[in-house]
Amino acid sequence: MSTAQPRLAAAPFDERIPLDAARSLPARIYGQRGRAAAPQGSAPGLSVGRPTPALVLHFHAGAFVSGGLDSGTLVAGLLAEAGAVVVSIDYPLAPAQPFPAAVEAGHAALEWAWRQRGRLAGPGASLWVAGEEAGGNLAAAAAAMARDQQQPALAGQILLSPMLDMCVATGSLRKAQAGPVGCRWADGWHDYLAGPDDAIHPYAAPGRALRLAGLPPTLLITAEDDPMRDETRAYAERLRKAGVRVEQALLPAPTGWPCAFMQAPQPEPAWAAPLRDRLYRFLSADQARSRGDPPTAA
């Protein structure tokens, strides 16, 4: 039985995130802001409000070269239904803007979300990053940058079928017949990395980063038919060895991941409900820990 408790969310709305005096980043906000509880001794009948939701900065899929706010709707909506307020961003795309443009824009958006968290999500909202496919790479890179710069404080990262290794040589990729020739992910990496030195940068290829300690609690989700399955599992193992708290999920086939992330099929795909459930449990469990609630049975 699903433990997720989706709520009616406010209609999404668009906003622009200032990057500097001349540039801004398009963003779409999903979910519903929490309200503070009624003070003790308030008149009977006053609403006790809604718990403050997590605030999640979301990066869409697209192999670094495609996608936008519309193609990120499916996963952003599932995060909102799982109880979060979601800021989905339209980050710079390669090859016009190769690495590190998207990572730098993502971290700037993360700092903006931290400053705006009370307005967007409510008092004391925790801040998270999430992303699917190339967006999972960028979410992991933004989390690493936040750790290195010691700001902003992150409660966790959620990575769905993330693109983490530019070698495109795992068994799951070979099984999907997604080798270097005509492979959208190999082509995406080629366009994203402007030079050979970028390939060894820890923000460009988080799966090969040498230092993983200090990253926030991580949820990694892949699927049986996911070409990114092996690199997702390898990253989870390396995070654990570095002392990072990790949760994993493997969804049954067929999912069509990661290409299915960019579609908005009707009716809802079969994998949406178990994914929503995992998101809800991860977000709510971490918020319970931050409140000091006693642990509950899974």
Image (cartoon, rainbow, N blue to C red):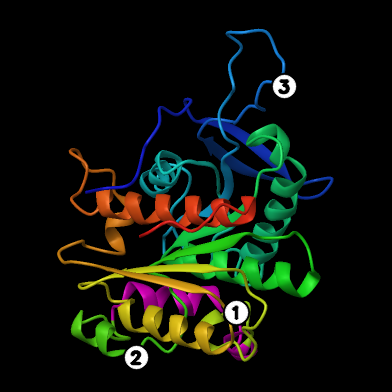
Q: Residue 187: x and y, percent?
A: 40, 76
Q: What residue sits right under mark 3 in the picture?
A: 39
Residue mark closest to the camera, 2 vs 3: 3
Q: Residue type at mark 2: give it.
A: Ala
Q: Choose top left, top right, bottom left or bottom right for residue 247.
A: bottom left
Q: Residue 25: x and y, percent?
A: 65, 46
Check contact, mark 1 vs mark 2: CB within 8 A: no
Q: Residue type at mark 1: give it.
A: Ala
| Of the pair 296 and 32, the residue shown nearer to us | 296
Q: How many residues crowd around disc 1 within 10 Å: few (fewer than 14), some, or many (20 or more)? A: some
- Whichever of callouts 1 and 3 sits on the residue coming sooner in the sequence is 3
Taking the spot 41% from the left edge, 44% from the top edge, the residue there is 82
Q: What residue sits right under mark 1 in the picture?
A: 194
* Residue 21 belongs to the span the image colors magenta: no
* Residue 198 belongs to the span the image colors magenta: yes
Q: Is residue 95 visible?
A: no
Give the residues drawn in magenta, as a range. Answer: 182-200
Figure check: 179 above or below 106: below
Q: How many residues crowd around disc 3 within 10 Å: few (fewer than 14), some, or many (20 or more)? A: few
Figure check: 180 above or below 31: below
In the drawing, what numbered circle is on residue 169? 2
User: What secondary structure predominates along the stretch shown in magenta?
Assistant: helix
